[in-house]
Image (tube, rainbow, N blue to C red):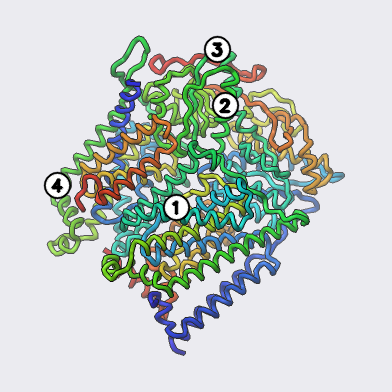
């Protein structure tokens, strides 16, 4: 039992890094653009397929493909925001909701066309290797820590830290923050809103791409994989509160802990239900999330 | 309640125009089964009518009240399950079972509406999305399988009136479910029309325009929102019940599939939310087009594999150029291409 | 004309248009007879969407057999020979679309008989339409018993019932190790998998094994490591999965991640397809899968292929890869119709249905015989992934290409 709990704790910690990365891009787009990007999941999916293609066709190490998928998704994101979403950004919430939903359909079906519906998996030679903590020779059991997940955890935190530095220390980052807080005031002080939005959306997409690359190493996927991550991103951002990078990490940690604990209980088939119940309760008692200020 | 562009334009004569147009449409719909249409054509119309009903049902909460409900599939699924359980365990006839399913959905909407409707905007949207997912898991969970048979679903009785040959029964069945869909559409349109003439309807629009102001004016906003949510759930649940008996089986992963939430919203938004006619036209034409794309080969080109992608592009184009739906076009005095640019100019960054 | 009356007339015109659309919607058109005698089958198969891959296999099976049988002169109906045609649509893996398209095939395209779709949901809704119009359907891709226990007369299936799926794998393991004691069962929360699990759980108990862990998880789960952690705490001899391909891959991948070891791994769906080995690489090794058909089986049949090996060659010549059981099952459905039509001497649905019900013929797919409720009676074969990266048939004994390797070594010793 102790071992099961210990292993679960390790699982939860490693999972939370990846989930934080999944939610980061979603959170910054929501916070700055006030757009719930329903295509976020398909950006993650594209990242996974870029890694898969580079790995299976060119033999590139999956970790080395992360910059490639980030760059590709950055460009895709910039194009989508500048070319489409910017046109309706001031329309009511439902309009951007449905627009990104339409984009999601298009992207998923493009992926189905290009890569087919097969379940794919990225399994380099070192996949699944790891080290064991608290190994008990008598039962031959211990707490297993897989290298791939550990690396994914570290990369996620690094990217979160990089985003934090970018947002707080650079001119562009501060322009994004200013736009998120008050678009009109930012405009008056010389920020060009449309390109700033496009840049923000592109950063969000690039982070999703990195998340997709990491996820491809941990689990099999197909073009429909994104939907589940979109929902997780929602919950995590709401738990952590909109507009804070540490909040997202906290939200991800809480989500991962609950997810893992429910997973070892008889409530496992109600996993998502429990997560959503948690979400609704949080929204009722604290409509701005557990650790939220209003915006970036 | 002069909110839609139609109403403004038609002024005093709008009742007459609506009356005539509605009567003609209804006559055409009632005439259809007497023409020599194939079973498939009637089925095609039936699904399009059902989406029109669901779009109009969503319109109560999403269009008139302005609350972006993303969980209406929960009511669809509960309507289907309520109907199935009433028919198979209690051996009720279809119509009372369908009503029971719809009432179950409405009761559930009140239960979750009281907390969830306190949230606004995006948070409400997400919360309802979550409630729908959670409801699916709950219905298919082992803990409830005594009642719902868990993930294995429920088989319903087969529609086959006694004394008919199988082929006659098939035709009777097609007509029965078609006419039931027409009846549901008449009901939901009548309900919407009545709503626009009552205090509740005015309250809902006031909430959409400015909830705090509405509250200050003495409107019981909680009650009004819950009522709109329950209306939405009731009619969505009716369609769920229709689905269950028509399909003869239900599986949780099917009746709680998120596509039933999304296509209803699309129908309403493409047609024009917050109007009596818009969601009906939007829902009907969206589903009719969607079905057409599954088998058609226009100009000898097989669109099948791009079917869903085409719908996606269609949504994107309509949303960008007509964010207030087709009704926006119909309500203009004169059509000119500038409408599209005007919409973009208004909403771009 | 004032703008008001213009709008009024516009509305009116729109209503008329709606009415015209209703009236002018494509009227029934009979299928082109296309020659003296053609038997037209109709099918709606998932060529896009979640089960596009399996749908493609099924379509390949239909296409291959129909092309081959037409080369030999077609079906014998009474005294004449008839060519065979197939009208096929894409149901997009969506039961609603499936129902609509089957209705179109029957009432617009006027096909003679129906071949089935792939997947539990589409088979459920397609079979209801077949029953409605009283047209027999033989389906290759739905194994849920609930499809067959509805009292429908027109549905026949060539996959063995879901509850029997894991039995032969359990038997194969027990034959190697009578001392295996504990079993963990992971169940995807969908209709088919639940039936598989119920059947397996009952069989496990009947064989005197102990079910130490049995747990459903939501369909579409992305991360199963928490359930596997719980399984690890129980340290079972055998891990069984009632699920589909993606989940089988997920379980193996994450079992290695958290260091969960078992002496045997078996899954209802997944390992028996080549994708499983391609996706997992060497981590697929030692995993058992069950399948109604493999090219290694020893059947002698009275059909145009005769043996599994000859069917596999024909399939490989056309599609460049060995056939999966989906394709074989699809071919078996058309063979069932061929035999029934030849016995009936006509394509009359009632006559064909009567012959299908009492069909009993040996084929390359094995004995084609349907239980009273319409589902085939057929044992499952067992396959295992070998360290050389190939999948071999290990059960039944007469067709075994290799012996079963047991126990699977722990991950650290591989």
The residue where tag 4 is placed is: A168
Which is closer to the viewer, label 1 or label 4? 1
Q: Quadrant of the C terminus of chain C?
A: top left
Above/below status of A208 relative to A35: above
Work out whether residue C108 or residue B15 is closer to the camera in this orientation and state it.
B15
The residue where tag 3 is placed is: C177
Q: Are marks 2 and 3 on the same chain?
A: yes
- Please name the residue shown 54% across and 78% down the image: B21
The subunit carrying tag 1 is: B
The residue where tag 1 is placed is: B108
Disc 2 versus disc 3: distance between alpha carbons? Answer: 18 Å
Helix, strand or loop status at disc 4: helix
Disc 1 versus disc 2: distance between alpha carbons? Answer: 36 Å
Disc 4 versus disc 2: distance between alpha carbons? Answer: 57 Å
Q: Few, some or many C-alpha atoms within 10 Å of disc 1 (few <14, some 14-19, many ≥20)?
A: some
- Please name the residue shown 65% across and 17% down the image: C397
Q: Is residue C150 visible?
A: yes
The subunit carrying tag 3 is: C
- Residue C200: assigned label: 2
Q: Residue furthest right?
A: C79
Which is closer to the viewer, label 3 or label 4? 3
- Please name the residue shown 84% across and 44% down the image: C345
């Amino acid at each position: 039992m102790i071992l099961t709990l210990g292993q679960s704790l390790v699982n939860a910690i490693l999972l939370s890094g990846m989930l934080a990365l999944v939610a980061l891009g979603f959170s910054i787009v929501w916070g700055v653009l006030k757009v719930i990007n329903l295509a976020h999941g398909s950006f993650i999916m594209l990242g996974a397929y870029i890694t898969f293609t580079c790995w299976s066709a060119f033999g590139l190490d999956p970790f080395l493909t992360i910059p490639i998928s980030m760059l590709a998704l950055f460009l895709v994101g910039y194009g989508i925001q500048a070319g489409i979403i910017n046109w309706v950004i001031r329309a009511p919430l439902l309009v951007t909701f449905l627009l990104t939903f339409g984009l999601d359909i298009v992207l998923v079906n493009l992926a189905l066309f290009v890569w087919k519906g097969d379940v794919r998996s990225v399994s380099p030679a070192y996949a699944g290797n790891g080290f064991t903590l608290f190994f008990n020779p008598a039962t031959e059991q211990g707490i297993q820590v897989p290298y791939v997940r550990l690396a994914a955890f570290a990369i996620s935190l690094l990217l979160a830290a990089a985003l934090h530095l970018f947002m707080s220390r650079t001119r562009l980052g501060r322009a994004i923050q200013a736009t998120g807080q008050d678009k009109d005031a930012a405009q008056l002080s010389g920020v060009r809103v449309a390109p700033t939005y496009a840049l923000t959306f592109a950063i969000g997409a690039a982070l999703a791409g990195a998340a997709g690359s990491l996820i491809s190493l941990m689990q099999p996927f197909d073009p429909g994989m994104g939907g589940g991550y979109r929902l997780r991103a929602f919950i995590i951002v709401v738990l952590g509160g909109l507009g804070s990078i540490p909040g997202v990490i906290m939200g991800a940690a809480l989500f991962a802990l609950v997810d893992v604990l429910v997973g070892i209980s008889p409530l496992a088939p109600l996993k998502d239900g429990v997560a959503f119940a948690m979400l609704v309760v949080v929204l009722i008692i604290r409509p701005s999330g557990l650790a939220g200020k209003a915006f970036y | 309640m002069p909110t839609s562009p139609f109403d403004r334009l038609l002024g005093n004569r709008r009742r007459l125009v609506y009356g005539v147009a509605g009567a003609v449409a209804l006559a055409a719909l009632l005439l259809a089964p007497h023409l020599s249409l194939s079973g498939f054509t009637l089925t095609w119309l039936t699904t399009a009518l059902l989406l029109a009903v669901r779009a109009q049902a969503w319109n109560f909460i999403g269009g008139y009240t302005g609350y972006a409900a993303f969980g209406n599939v929960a009511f669809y699924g509960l309507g289907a399950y309520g109907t199935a359980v009433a028919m198979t365990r209690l051996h009720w006839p279809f119509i009372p079972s369908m009503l029971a399913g719809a009432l179950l959905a409405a009761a559930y909407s009140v239960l979750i509406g009281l907390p969830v409707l306190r949230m606004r905007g995006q948070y409400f949207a997400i919360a309802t999305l979550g409630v729908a997912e959670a409801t699916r898991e709950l219905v298919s969970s082992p803990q409830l399988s005594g009642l719902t048979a868990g993930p294995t679903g429920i088989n319903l009785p087969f529609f086959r009136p006694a004394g008919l040959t199988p082929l006659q029964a098939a035709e009777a069945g097609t007509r029965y479910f078609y006419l039931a869909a027409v009846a549901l559409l008449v009901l939901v349109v009548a309900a919407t029309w009545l709503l626009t003439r009552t205090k509740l309807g005015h309250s809902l629009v006031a909430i959409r325009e400015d909830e705090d102001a509405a509250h200050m004016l003495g409107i019981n906003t909680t009650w009004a929102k819950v009522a709109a949510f329950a209306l939405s759930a009731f009619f969505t649940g009716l369609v769920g019940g229709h689905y269950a008996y028509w399909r003869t089986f239900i599986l949780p992963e099917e009746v709680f599939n998120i596509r039933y939430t999304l296509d209803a919203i699309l129908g309403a938004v493409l047609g024009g939310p917050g109007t009596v006619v818009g969601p009906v036209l939007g829902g009907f034409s969206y589903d009719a087009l969607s079905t057409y794309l599954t088998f058609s080969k226009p100009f000898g080109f097989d669109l099948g594999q791009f079917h869903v992608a085409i719908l996606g592009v269609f949504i994107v184009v309509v949303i960008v150029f007509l964010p207030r739906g087709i009704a926006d076009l119909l309500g203009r005095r004169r059509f000119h291409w500038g409408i599209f640019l005007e919409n973009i100019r208004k909403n771009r960054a | 004309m004032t703008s008001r009356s213009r709008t009024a007339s516009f509305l009116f015109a729109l209503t008329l248009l709606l009415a015209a659309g209703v009236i002018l919607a494509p009227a029934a058109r009979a299928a082109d007879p296309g020659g003296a005698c053609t038997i037209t089958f109709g099918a709606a198969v998932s060529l896009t969407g979640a089960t596009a891959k399996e749908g493609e296999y099924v379509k390949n099976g239909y296409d291959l057999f129909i092309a081959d049988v037409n080369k030999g002169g077609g079906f014998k109906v009474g005294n004449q020979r008839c060519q065979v045609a197939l009208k096929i649509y894409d149901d997009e893996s969506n039961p609603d679309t499936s129902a609509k398209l089957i209705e179109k095939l029957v009432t617009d395209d006027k096909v003679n008989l129906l071949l089935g779709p792939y997947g539990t949901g589409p088979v459920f809704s397609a079979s209801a339409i077949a029953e409605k119009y009283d047209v027999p359907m033989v389906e290759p891709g739905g194994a849920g018993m609930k499809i067959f226990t509805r009292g429908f007369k027109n549905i026949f299936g060539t996959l063995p019932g879901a509850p029997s799926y894991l039995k032969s794998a359990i038997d194969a393991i027990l034959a190697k190790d009578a001392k295996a004691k504990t079993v963990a069962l992971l169940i995807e929360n969908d209709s088919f998998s639940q039936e598989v699990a119920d059947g397996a759980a009952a069989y496990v108990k009947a064989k005197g094994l102990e079910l130490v862990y049995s747990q459903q998880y939501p369909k579409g789960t992305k991360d199963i490591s928490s359930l596997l952690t719980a399984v690890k705490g129980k340290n079972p001899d055998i891990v069984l999965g009632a699920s589909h391909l993606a989940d089988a891959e997920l379980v193996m991948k994450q079992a290695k991640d958290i260091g969960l070891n078992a002496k045997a791994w078996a899954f209802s769906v997944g390992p028996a397809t080549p994708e499983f080995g391609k996706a997992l690489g060497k981590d697929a090794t030692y995993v058992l899968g069950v399948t109604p058909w493999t090219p290694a089986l020893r059947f002698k049949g009275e059909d145009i292929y005769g043996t599994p090996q000859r069917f596999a060659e024909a399939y490989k010549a056309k599609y460049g890869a060995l056939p999966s059981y989906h394709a074989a099952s699809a071919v078996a459905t058309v063979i069932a119709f061929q035999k029934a039509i030849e016995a009936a001497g006509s394509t009359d649905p009632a006559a064909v249905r009567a012959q299908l019900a009492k069909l009993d013929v040996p084929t390359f797919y094995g004995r084609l015989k349907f239980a009273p409720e319409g589902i085939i009676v057929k044992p499952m074969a067992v396959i295992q992934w070998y360290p050389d990266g190939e999948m071999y048939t290990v059960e039944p004994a007469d067709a075994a290409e290799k012996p079963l390797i047991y126990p699977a070594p722990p991950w650290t010793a591989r």
